Image (spheres, rainbow, N blue to C red):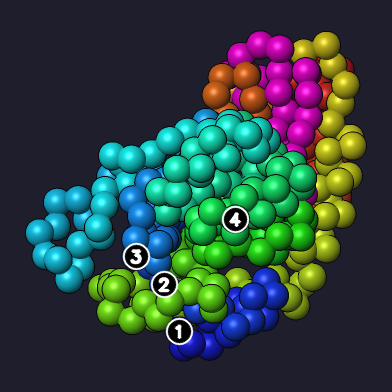
Amino acid sequence: MQEDLARKLGQACGYEDWSLFLVNSGAEANENALKLASFHTGRDKIVAFHGAFHGRTSGAVAVTDNPKIQAPFNAHHKVAFATLNDLDSVEQELRGGDVAAVILEAIQGVGGIRIATDEFLQGLRALCTKYGTVLIMDEVQCGYGRTGWFFAHQKAGITPDLVSVAKGMANGFPIGGVLISPEFKATKGMLGTTFGGNYLAMAGAHAVLDIIRKENLLENVSRTGAWLKANIPTSPLIKEVRGEGLMLGIEFTQPVADIRKKLLFEKHIFTGVSGTSMIRLLAPLVLSVDDAAIFVQALKEVLNA
Ligand SMILES: *Cc1c(COP(=O)(O)O)cnc(C)c1O
């Protein structure tokens, strides 16, 4: 069942000869991706980005006193933060030759729908190859069809070394995974898990991939997302609308708490948030244009636009 899922996920995203290590959450997927990068390179430094969100665990491995399962580093002690879409700020860190991995979201979710440009991702891929650094794409939020691409980084035409997934993978049931490029050294015995790959999670993950394919959801996300983005009302209160597919952020010129309250209590629409002045929309991938139109109308009424 786990092997079938790895095969099915590989087919869905186009990384057919990759391995899949199954875990239970996004944070755990990233922890394991960072461990793998460290094992693979023998290095201990990580480069992440300002505004990034990768999960809440704090590296349980740092308090593990068993050489067989202990990572050779604690990620939390050697992290440098570079600036998104600024290749120089990354190369500055990579030059020392001690960076195991660069980890990033192709679109920062919690950070406020900040988009890594195609050129930046392509440049980053080249830099990581040049310096022998592992490129980890955290697709926990922006992946699994959310942007209309299976993975958000695929829009830039790049192939990372590791991809972490979770959130949408079993449509709400806890599961996560690390997709591992075939170029990676054998990792047997380096990683472990108790609940990873459990049968209930597998059933959910299989169903999600089946439905994404059968119902053509990537196409639906592109179509509905493009319509929604183009039809967000213009208003003096709205500064910018950005995002891709059904991962959209509406940035306001003022805090959005009252607008969100009105949307919820008067229009019965629950919206997400990022910071204080952005409404973050992460609608279900099955959202239709008709559904989206209900939201647009409600927002117009709430904003008097
Ligand atoms: C939610 C999220 C995580 C953490 O996932 P959990 O399942 O909550 O541990 C990691 N990265 C990104 C980009 C996320 O949005």
- What's the CA distance linking mark 3 and mark 2? 18 Å
- Determine which residue is flagged by label 1: 2
> Is there CB contact under 8 Å for labels 2 and 1?
yes
The magenta stretch is 238-260
Badge nearest the viewer, 4 or 2 = 4
Q: How many marks?
A: 4
Q: Residues within 10 Å of mark 3 (few under 14, many from 20)?
A: some
Is 182 on the left or on the right of 13, as rendered? left
**Dot 1 or dot 3, earlier in sequence:** 1
- Determine which residue is flagged by label 3: 39
**Dot 2 or dot 1, earlier in sequence:** 1
Identity, as a three-letter code, of the amino acid under mark 4: Lys
Q: Is mark 1 within 8 Å of ligand 1?
A: no
Q: Residue at x 47, y 67 (%)?
A: 178
- Determine which residue is flagged by label 2: 22
Image height of 268 relative to 212, above or below: above
